Image: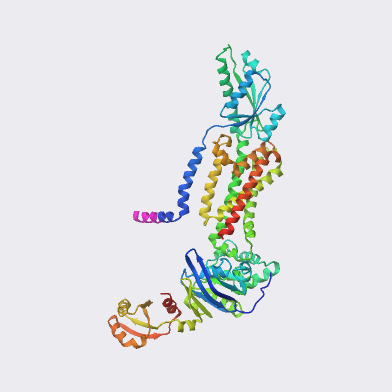
Amino acid sequence: MIDSPAPAGPAIIVAGLTKRFGHFTAVDAIDFSVQRGEIFGFLGPNGSGKTTTIRMLLGLLPPTAGAAHVLGIDVARRAGQIARRVGYMSQHFSLYPDLTVAENLDFYGRAYGLRGRTLRRRRQEALARVGLEAQRRQITASLPGGWRQRLALAAAILHEPALIFLDEPTAGVDPVSRRSFWRLLYDLAAEQTTLFVTTHYMDEAEQCHRLAFIHNGRLIAEGAPGQIKQTRMAGQVLEIRCEQPQAAMAALRQAGLADVALYGRRIHAIAPDLDRRLPELSALLAPAGLRGMQIIPPSLEDVFIANVQ
Amino acid sequence: MLVQILNLTWKELLQLARDRFLVLFLILAPTLQLVLLANNTARGIVDLPAAVLDLDQSALSRDLVLALDNSEEMQVRFFPPDRGHLLALLDAGDAQVGIVIPPGFSRAFFAGNDPAQIQALVDGSNVIVGANARQVIESVANQLLFRRLRHTPLPDMGGVEVRTSALFNPAFDFQWFGIPSMVAFITYQVALVVAATGFVREKELGTLEQLLITPLRRLELIIGKALPAILVGLFNFLLLLAVQRLGFGVPLRGDLGLLIAVAALFVVAIVGQGTLISVFTQTQQQAVLLVFLVAILEVTISGYLLPVESMPLVMRGLAQVSALQHFMAIMRAVALRGADLAMIQGHVLAIFIFALAAGGIAWRGFTRAL
């Protein structure tokens, strides 16, 4: 295997990247860059253009316009060279259910050109890293969901790529397994592996070094999670507790507050200058059995929903 | 309970209607099936290629040859100079029936008493055609001769008797004819279904996308997927061939190596066809349904149910592009007639072209669609 020329600079540089399917623009002139060793979160609602972007970065889809460089390789001109240098863990579990854990890894290892002793060593390392050594002879179909994700990660890191794309890697996995999966990602990032992750879980998004929001094919925010929460929120978040949330929400909407949402038994209302309107609102909400309210720092979820609406 | 049943039924129908492929299949497949089968039912043989050796050279014998040629069932294409050439034509499969009119045929006929004899040599490797040919010759001969006799009636007419010898299959054993065709057909089905579900299974699992971003090249991928199907098909063929020889006692008069080599080419062609199905379908269900449709088509046009010789002209044209039809012909020729490569080269060439075409289209579809 040829080692990558390891050019200095960002792992991914995207400039004006666009993909059209007929009249539909799936990805619309997006720009961003991903630094080496960074966990980069790529967020957006379903159908916003996330997977299309990843497919272009992997060299599977040619861009309609714009440019992207992945590990210094031009996606449009040398698409075929990206595959061997990056790892990819797709949205759907994509290993063979009827093969054992070790057989799956051997197959993918060989596909990446690993042979003999090197293959065996890398397989052992990958299994040890994801904690599946004891399961190596087990049929993949019999693994529980969380373990399968870890096996898929093991397959993606066998050839020691400098950059890994993870497309919703933890979809449908329980919280404990998600936590342990993310611990694996931190370890990889600490070793200077760049991770490009898409997710719908906001707690996971908070753990990324940097984030980009994509909506309807356009990039609407980019930056560190804290930075995005500060700059991308046009207003304050007021958390309200009361006896009759439905009545309270109706009252708030009548008072002209459009951005009102229920989080469990609490209401989040988002609007500018809410701190100055507290007395007025407490009078308004008294009939709904107001228990208490306070201005809280916005969560990523608030930012996400506010920006998408 | 009924409400729930209807609820479920409605849901199923909605899903069915949404699957455009399935709707198309449910309309197209039965229609096609019926059209094919209806057009292909029992017309009797047409224009069977015949070779005539007329050793009598009388007015009567020449009339008989003319009448045979004018009949719908037979076409006299060859006039070999002697018996040896006649047999060679039958060996090569150029003629499927040989007629020998012995010297003194005319005299024997007009002498009366015993029936005048002619000899029919039919290709016993195709039992249905052989049996048909005998009947045709007998009825044509008797019709003609009795028509002539209306003008000069003679007492004690014996008529004409056709002495038939079935070449290659003297006992006229139907199994000898049927089993090689069955072996070909089963090999065909196995290779087709294994290949057809290959890529589509990877599509369903989501592993195809994963494979596409590995350094595996497209050509490596397509050959790597085709090879196991080819091996399975070939193994199957060898197994069935052993059963044909040892279990059913069907002779293998030709070269075993030649037969295996041609079978390998045939399996490659069919795996190409299967891969084509696999590339253009999205689910295994679709692929299996298509295999089912194609197999019905092949059963009809390959001569598995009815000999190609008895098909209407359009169907006979279709049969020429059926790799299975050519392979069945090869199986019978090599096993029963002991044919060598020169005798079956037309069929081999047809399979080769089929393999190239199917492989080429599958490759184009694969590189375009993925």
Image coordinates of residue B95 in percent, x first then y, are 65, 32
The quadrant of the rendering that contains the N terminus of chain B is bottom left
Q: Residue furthest top?
A: B155
Picture coordinates of residue A243, whole percent (x, y): 31, 80
Which residue is more in the foreground, A9 or B45? A9
Residue A8: percent from the left, percent from the top?
Answer: 64, 79
> Does residue B21 lie above or below A307 as drawn?
above
Q: Is residue A283 magenta?
A: no
Query: Against B72, is B224 above or below?
Result: below
Query: Would you say residue A183 is visible in this rendering?
Result: no
Confirm whether the magenta stretch covers residue B8: yes
Image location of residue B43, percent across then percent down: 52, 33
Q: Which quarter of the rendered picture does the C terminus of chain B lie within?
A: bottom right
A49 lies left or right of A309: right
**Does B204 sit above or below residue B111?**
below
For the image, the number of numbered tags is: 0
Relative to A162, is B48 above or below? above
Q: Quadrant of residue A104?
A: bottom right
Residue stretch in magenta: B1-11
Taken as a whole, is the magenta stretch helix, strand or loop?
A: helix
Does any portion of residue A23 appear in the rendered image? yes
Q: Is residue A234 left or right of residue B287?
A: left
Front-most of residues B56 and B118: B56
Which residue corresponds to the image point at 66% horizontal and 44% vertical from the top-left? B349
Quick one: which residue is furthest to the left in this view? A287
Residue at the spot x=62%, y=17% of the render? Answer: B115
The coloring applied to the image is: rainbow
